Amino acid sequence: MPGAADGAAPLVAASAGTAGVTAVIAQLVSGFDGSRIHAEALTRAKHGMLDALGVALAGVNEPVSKIMLDYAAELPAGAGATIWGGRRRVLLTEAALVNGTLAHALDYDDMNRSMLGHPSAVLTAALLPLAETLRLPGRKVVEAYIVGLEAMARIGRIFGLKAYDYSWHPTAVLGTLGAAAGASYLLRLDYSQTINALGIAASEASGLKKNFGAMMKSVHAGSAARKGIWAAQFARRGLAADAAVFEGKFGFLDMFNGMPDAHEAPDAASRPLDIIAAGLVFKQYPCCGGLHSLLDVMLDLGAGKGLHADDVAEIECRVHPQKVAYLDRPQPADPLAAKFSIQYCVAVALLRGKVGLADFTVDAIVDASVRALMKKIRISGREDFAGFECELVVRTTGGSEITGRAREARGSMSNPLSEAELLRKFTDCAEAILTPAQAAEAGAALLAFDCESDLDRVLGLLCPR
């Protein structure tokens, strides 16, 4: 298949405009040639898995994680898949639920612009446990990750901002579809079975932005992983769904986006895989990615201009109006809500010169100096800004004005983190439960995951020894 070796999509058997989206995605998944994936695509997928597993280990002590781990402790142990960070094995779908929640608990996991959500928490939580139960090698997990992301991104590009503005959370909605696609690949479902898996997943897909800032948002990733596996398993057993579930009246895209006649773009067959074309955005800060460019600017102004909180009369944060809708939180009541507060995060960035895990605790969010500075921060929407573009205007007590602007945050494809920086983030996160030596060993193993034949060995490196 032309182009597969250099990152182009290995299979779209029908040309866009002549086949519906459901058929195109099912053919992509069931006929995907994983042996011809370009090395760069494999590396990026491993980076996504590394990031998801690292933030999951860092998130084990979060309140939502403790609820999930308590739930898992009551499940029958033994056969099944491993809960990350320990050695307990439970039913496969429940392991996916718990692991996906751990990976999203800190809101520190990566993002993808095509699907406007967090792919790696969902895909890693679904595919690694499934491969563990099937006794598959690491290479197959990485291939399935790329397949799942591709399906998620293709539907996501049609899904678009309109559905996001309708209050749907893409991590939950598209994550279910991507997990089903990746699971179908690992289970080696044929075209008809994959059609059914996608149809089942489409009926299961849901998740509301109303839960941003609440524990339930973290569960969205775990729920999507669980439902994706569930869909593929039942499709393998013969459970049938509509053969054109995405398109047409009452279809997935009509319901979520009012697009009953949607088709893929004309260049879909020749477009590079999304892991190459759009790639992954990695977070430097454990909070909502929609405000990271503001934090980059605030930290740069604080360090580069010698700006101090006492100098500030007002900070105006200019962002796309879509961000205002869910990030304007002048009085966050708990650490989860603080992760979605421009006021809190920007104030922390200036006062402390960093934004890290320690800044999202009950004690940290009620700090009097932070609360005082938050009162000087206001937010305005700019229709002319790109989705993640921002401008920060600091008006000083002396009457001067200091301005900084960014189109994307560091960690994006246009301003990427190095592999060394990603590995450092992993080890910093993993050291929440591992020794530095254990974290370093686990990180090295994950960067070579596609060469690993024994998943039990790798999973053992993710728990204290």
Image (spheres, grey):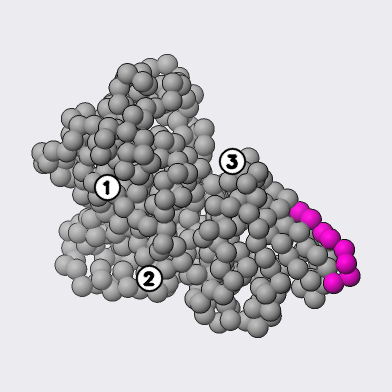
Residues in magenta? Answer: 397-404
Q: Secondary structure at mark 2?
A: helix
Mark 1 element type: helix
Q: Earlier in the sequence, mark 2 or mark 1?
A: 2
The one nearer the camera, 441 or 406, is 406
Q: Which mark is residue 258?
A: none
Number of numbered discs visible in the structure rendering: 3
Name the residue: 58% across, 46% down.
387
Mark 3: amino acid: Met
Disc nearer the start of the sequence (2/3): 2
Residue underneath mark 3 = 413
> What is the C-alpha distance between the residues marked 1 and 3?
27 Å
Which quadrant, please, contains the C terminus? bottom left
Q: Which quadrant of the figure has residue 433?
A: bottom left
Name the residue beneath numbered marker 1.
228
Residues at marks 2 and 3, CA–CA distance in whole angstroms: 31 Å
